[in-house]
Amino acid sequence: MRRIALTVGLWVLLATLASAQGWHEPKRGTAERKALMDALRGPAQSLFGAPVEFVVGELRVSGNLAFAMVRAQRPGGVPIQIETTPGWARNEFMYDADHTSGQALYRKEGGRWVVKDYTFGATDVWWSYGPICKVYRPVIADVCQGM
């Protein structure tokens, strides 16, 4: 009986902690996840050329705000040859950056997800900036501590 009580208590604690974070991750295959990735696809294709798909590292949604950490690739997991991309030709990447690693901040407007800011190949945690934290704290609280 005691073991059951401890198990139930642990589940209640975990559920409380999960809801305390204030955001959720849209599951694979959901319309919400597809809409978020589709919103980022245009900017990514501008940099990398088409087609682009994403490996999602983090995807957080809270109300009308969202944050994503992704890695861009070609369909089927084929790496992007960065030196052959439009972004490289326009000199939009730092030479020593992780070019296909990206982050995006979204806002839902008129029922659609819109990318408000994004970067591929960042060399810092640009989204931890005070004014960004002020707006996007519900989805990036872990990097906004003390701001």
Image (cartoon, grey):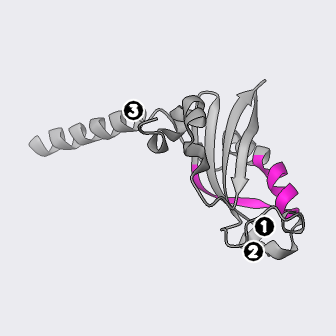
**98 shown above or below 143:** below
Q: Position of residue 92 (x, y in %)?
A: 81, 61
Task: Identify residue type, mark 2.
Answer: Val
Q: Is residue 68 left or right of residue 112?
A: left
Instruction: Tell me which corner region of the image, top left, top right, bottom left or bottom right, holds residue 66.
Output: top right
Residue that label 3 marks: 20
The answer to whether 56 is drawn above or below residue 64 in the figure is: below
* Magenta span contains residue 56: yes
**Amino acid on which disc 1 is placed:** Pro
Residue at x-position 84% and y-position 65%: 91
Disc 3 element: helix
Label 3 and label 1: CA atoms lie apart by 36 Å
Q: Is residue 1 visible?
A: no
Residue 78's disc is: 2
Mark 3 or mark 1: which comes first in sequence? 3
The answer to which image quadrant residue 96 occupies is: bottom right
Amino acid at the residue labelled 3: Ala
Tag 3 and tag 1, C-beta contact below 8 Å: no
Q: Percent position (x, y) of residue 131?
A: 59, 33
Q: Pointer 1: what residue?
A: 75
The extreme top residue here reads 110
Question: Dividing the image into 4 quarters, which one contains the N terminus?
Answer: top left
Residue 88 picture location, percent across and down: 84, 68
Q: Secondary structure at mark 1?
A: helix
Residue beneath the point at 84% across and 50% down: 42
Highlighted range, magenta: 40-58
Instruction: Out of 116 and 19, give the one closest to the viewer.
Output: 116
